[in-house]
Image (cartoon, grey):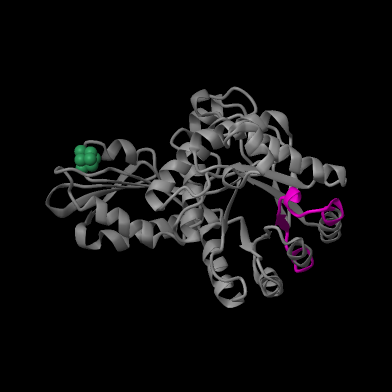
Amino acid sequence: MTTNGPSLRPWRDIERRKSRQIMVGGTAVGGDAPITVQTMTNTPTEDAVATLDQIRRCEEAGADIIRVSCPTEESTASFKKIAKAAAVPLVADIHFHYKRALEAADAGAACLRINPGNIGSSERVAEVVRAAKANGCAIRIGVNAGSLEKDLLEKYGEPCPEALIESALDHIKLLQDHDFHEYKVAVKASDVFLAVAAYHGLAETVDCPLHLGITEAGGLIGGTVKSSIGIGSLLWAGIGDTIRVSLSAEPEEEVRVGFEMLKALGLRTRGVRVVSCPSCSRQGFDVIRTVEALEDRLQHIKTPLSLSVLGCVVNGPGEARETDIGLTGGGKGKHMVYLSGVTDHHIESNDMLDHIVGLVEEKAAAIEAGEATAFDPHAEKNATKEPAE
Ligand code: SF4
């Protein structure tokens, strides 16, 4: 949770670095705006239908901003249709071909991902900046340890935090020289130590919003672990205004992982927060299969609320006391259901899944309609002791 002052639970406080706010389309990035979650499409951009299908799935998963690569003239032509139909702002990803940046800015990009130092003459940079200004586009500078400029590699010998930061500052200067300030910056590396050190250094040097990512992090499990350590440690230190988890997995999975990271740190809430045990021989039902099925069937819930699923009474009642809906395994296929932390009724194994899904949907609908609030087990204490944030 973020805070402006001392709170009742200081061990949960994260003091966010104060960055300058910019707009990516209608979405604020930086300042006190919520940390946004991004992903990137991997369909051919020339195929507007397939790309929009993927964008819809990412929007459904909660993506705030989506990046779409524009390597060809055909792709920027298609980008125009895609940007018109997308509900979230789109970032056009450009490498080297500055003309694609001009086309994408005209085609409705909310942001251009381009490194001004890579596109040639100062006149070209000026053209891109003119196009960005004329179309209200932001620019994202994306420094990557894998494609550092040759002179910096020669100067530093290898990719190191100082080299990444210097590269970022060089690109930033080019934009500032053209009086352009609507930019955010990333200094990514696949090495967690390198990326984290570079972000820390950059955060102390500039005031623009920072886009966090551990690039080429790996597959769903390995990449999630690596990203959670890298992005998670930065977020915990208060650094980062927008994040992209790079996984060799479907883009909507990246969005889910990004949100889980923010949820774990109390920086954002969305959907059902599931508390569940690993299960053991004491379990009264198959916890693993139940949680898998519940997570799958509850993906459509966007309202923040909590659900605990525990196999037995060892930890079940304690966790259920802290959640909107609790399920604790009991003997002979009969399990206890808790509502807002209090024991309520029993349910049998065969009816359990449909029943819990129904309860979560009901509670989410009641919260949406303003007839209920998400359960806060410490509400009374908070009301009397915790200063307003
Ligand atoms: S809550 Fe019960 S079933 Fe789950 S891991 Fe703990 S002891 Fe085992």
| Viewport quadrant of the C terminus | top right
Residue at image position (53%, 32%) is 236
| Viewport quadrant of the N terminus | top right
Q: How many marks?
A: 0
Q: Position of residue 323 (x, y in %)?
A: 39, 43
Q: Nearer the viewer, residue 335 or 139?
A: 139
Residue at image position (87%, 47%) is 178
Which quadrant would residue 98 be assigned to in this image? Answer: bottom right
Left or right side of 159 for 263: left
Left or right side of 59 for 151: right
**Looking at the picture, does residue 19 appear above or below residue 256?**
above
Region of the chain picked out in magenta, as a range: 104-125
Is residue 56 one of those drawn in magenta? no
Residue 32 in view here: no
Q: Nearer the viewer, residue 347 or 180?
A: 180
Left or right side of 223 for 130: right
Give the farthest residue toward the front. Answer: 154
Give the farthest residue toward the left. Answer: 332
Residue 98 in view here: yes
Q: Position of residue 286 (x, y in %)?
A: 20, 53
Q: Position of residue 277 (x, y in %)?
A: 28, 43
Is residue 120 one of those drawn in magenta? yes
Find ligand 1 in the image and state its quadrant. top left
Q: Position of residue 68 (x, y in %)?
A: 62, 63
Left or right side of 311 for 106: right
